[in-house]
Amino acid sequence: MKTQDYIKEFAIIFFIQKRVILGVVLAAVVIGTLIVLFAPRSYQAKGAVILKGSQLLQSQETLTDVRAEVGPISEADLFSDMEIIQSLDVVLGAIHRVQAEGKLDIDINDIEMMSRMASNIQKNMTTSLVPRSTIIRVNLTWNSPEIATYLLSAVFEEYLKRRQSVFNPEEEVAFFETQLKSFHDSLNTLEDQMVEVSGGTNAQALSNLIKRNIELLADLEKDMTNLESQRIAKTHYVDYLEDSMKRDGINLFTAIDSLELGDFSKKVQDLLIEKEAKLRVYTEQNPQVVRETETLDRLYKVYRKEVQSHIEKERSELRGVEDQILAAKEQMAGVERKNAELYQKMLDAERLDREHGVIEDSYKTFATRYREAKIRSETESDRLFSVSILERAYASNQSIFPKAGRILPISLILGLLMGVTIGFLLEFFDHRFKRPEDINNYTGVVYLFSVPDKSTH
């Protein structure tokens, strides 16, 4: 099967629609030429600012004495400054500045005209970041290189002014001044009260006494821990012995740590061994076995009485330990009550000193903040430490639009693309037979010969 030759098809269609294609190309070139010759000229003013340090915003309502330091600039800082440059306040300020210098013929009282002018400047002004730097480049396109330069220079000045008012507002100085006066008055009042107060308990002596009581409480807590351990051990020991006393049969009570009871236990154990030995030879009714049993019973009764006495002794010691615990608890409670009273007395003694120290520290902090705010409120301080104009606004006399070297090739390429597209669309929707091959392609009928149509030439 013979495949379709697409290159040949393209060439045939191109030559069939060559008039349309060439017409569209010619029209596009003519339009591009008219744009180059008659379109309004646009010029671009360029400039750049550099940020030296990040603005550290600190809460002015707090009394913490935080020393301001220049920190690294983040991407958010750079984008914030870009927004300030393109803000409406900056643009309107620049228009007022240029108009005041007589460089711009515009009625600043006409709100609609000012709005259009500001919108036009914002639309034609672009900002961009220089990679791996803190430099912001600003471009402004205008129909005059001089006006573009004047406007961009004014934008830079208004940007610096607006940035200063945003990060270091004038109200900051007044705020610190008011706070400083308030603390100064409070300090004078408190000092007068301290002069009137006489006598009183020495706060340092109370503090030392409280420390000694705390050490005493720590010792008592250790004693309480030991006593609680003894109480728990004694309780379990007595309970175990009493449970053993309730069991049937002979119990040697080997858990008892006593020499006397240990001797009893050994005697009972020896008699048990002798009885077991005789039971291997005699029966339980044998007189010797009976005597051994009676002797063992008498001795075991005495042994149980001794064990019961030992239990009573241990229980008495347990009650003594519990009494010691109660006494220790009462002593700890007394020390804690005494400490609470001492704390109250110490608080009363230190109240004036503490208030005086706090107000004095606040006064010093706000005095420092006030001096810093006065320095920051100066416009030049922002330029010295935070931001500077790296490249002042300038504009070339060569227009950036229209440029023949760029517009004419583009118009030629666009015209060729549009012409070929239109030609192919016309050919695609034209279903007439224009070539002998169309008969075979669309009908499947074999053609024998063709006669050219001379009437179209």
Image (cartoon, rainbow, N blue to C red):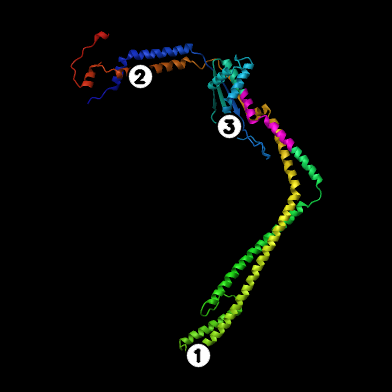
Residue 131 versus residue 147 in the image, above or below: below
> Residue 415: where, in percent of width, then height?
39, 16
Viewer-proximal residue among 359 and 163: 359
Q: Which mark is residue 342?
A: none
In three-dimensional space, the C-alpha distance between marks 1 and 2, rounded to whole angstroms, equals: 136 Å
In three-dimensional space, the C-alpha distance between marks 3 and 2, rounded to whole angstroms, equals: 49 Å
Residue 226 seen in render:
yes
Residue 271 versus residue 25 in the image, above or below: below
Quadrant in which residue 102 is drawn = top right
Q: Nearer the viewer, mark 1 or mark 3?
A: 1
Going 35% across and 15% down the picture, which residue do you hit? 21
Circle 2: element type: helix
The residue that disc 1 covers is 288
Query: Earlier along the polypeptide chain: callout 3 or callout 2?
Result: 3
Going 24% across and 10% down the picture, which residue do you hit? 453
The residue that disc 2 covers is 421
Going 47% across and 86% down the picture, which residue do you hit? 279
In the displayed structure image, the side of residue 225 where residue 295 appears, left or right: left
Residue span colored magenta? 157-182
Query: Earlier along the polypeptide chain: callout 1 or callout 3?
Result: 3
Q: Is 113 within the magenta?
A: no
